[in-house]
Image: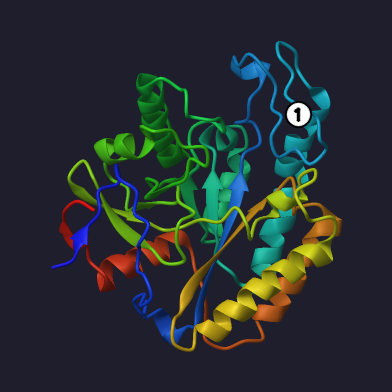
Amino acid sequence: MQLMPDDAERDFIGYGATPPDPRWPGGARVAININLNYEAGGEHSLLEGDSHSEGMLTDIGFPAYEGVRSPIVESVFEYGSRCGVWRLLRIFARFGIPVSILAVVRALERNPEVARAMVAAGHEILSHGYRWIDYHHVPEAVEREHIAKAVASLTQLTGNRPLGWFTGRSGPNTRRLLAEHGGFLYDRDSLGDELPYWVAVAGQPYLIVPYSLETNDNRFDQNHGFSKADDFFAYLKDCFDLLYEEGADQPKLMSIAIHDRLIGRPARAVGLIRFLDYVKGFERVWFCRGIDIARHWRQHFPPPGIGGV
């Protein structure tokens, strides 16, 4: 029997030259999973008791400021929750596409109206942590508390317990703490494959559905590569075209990540619209949420035996 690698070790082999046929629904050659990061109000802020302002993924190039607020950066995040998220929800509705909402829970607490709209539209809401911060140096006890708060608050806000998790800046304790808390079907904190895969965490099977920081509108951030909508469209199109060609005998997952404060701007949103127009012209494409992938994998590829690498 194949043995499941322990998450505490590093696996450089994965599926190797012969990845499994994922048997996506409808015989799809590509599964497309769009992930909308909702983070406004959960970022670093002196108003949240942090020592500095946010300096990451603001697209205007302002650094983090120690000990003082950064009003212009705060307004970038506010744009996402005031305008960008609503534009994106309209686009998803126009194309009839279900997506995964990677929700920073503190952010949704500050805008329950958008949480209700996401649920009503049939989108999956999974936890993007209680705060949008880097957990590499957060004490284990604090991170454990944040996981519990995230689950409790998302359950209250949406009426359903989150079944997926994505920290984004996960620390060395994150996956173990999630396994200890229990109740999650998968997490997204990996860039390591193009198909889901199992690992062992604390001696138990644990499913990972890979994410992407590459087919991601974070490249609209300062000096990261995208400067206009056509750049975003061309990059996604090239990725899809190759995956679709390879999908004739090796279907894969295309994970796309977006942010309401980035792609939600009008001049950028048209790149997303062009991509959706393009891929809607293909047959055998499965638009899915992360939870759909996780349930499919659990049904068709149950965990193998547990062992070491």
Determine whether 53 is above or below 307 in the image: above
Q: Position of residue 94 (x, y in %)?
A: 69, 70
Query: Which image quadrant is residue 296 in?
Result: bottom left
Q: Residues within 10 Å of mark 1 (few under 14, many from 20)?
A: some
Residue drawn at 56 percent across, 77 percent down: 243
Q: Is residue 64 left or right of residue 111?
A: right
Query: Which image quadrant is residue 23 in?
Result: bottom left
Residue drawn at 25 percent across, 54 percent down: 5
For badge 1, the amino acid type reads: Glu
Quadrant of the snapshot with the N terminus: bottom left
Determine whether 277 is above or below 35 in the image: below
- Residue 273 visible (yes or no): no
Residue drawn at 36 percent across, 53 percent down: 186
Q: Position of residue 159 (x, y in %)?
A: 42, 46
Secondary element under disc 1, as helix, strand or loop, is: helix
Q: Is residue 300 left or right of residue 250?
A: left
- Residue bearing the label numbered 1: 74
Q: Nearer the viewer, residue 234 or 41?
A: 234
Q: Position of residue 111 (x, y in %)?
A: 62, 37
Q: Nearer the viewer, residue 114 or 48?
A: 48
Q: Position of residue 211 (x, y in %)?
A: 51, 56
Determine whether 173 is above or below 300 in the image: above
Q: Is residue 215 left or right of residue 9?
A: right
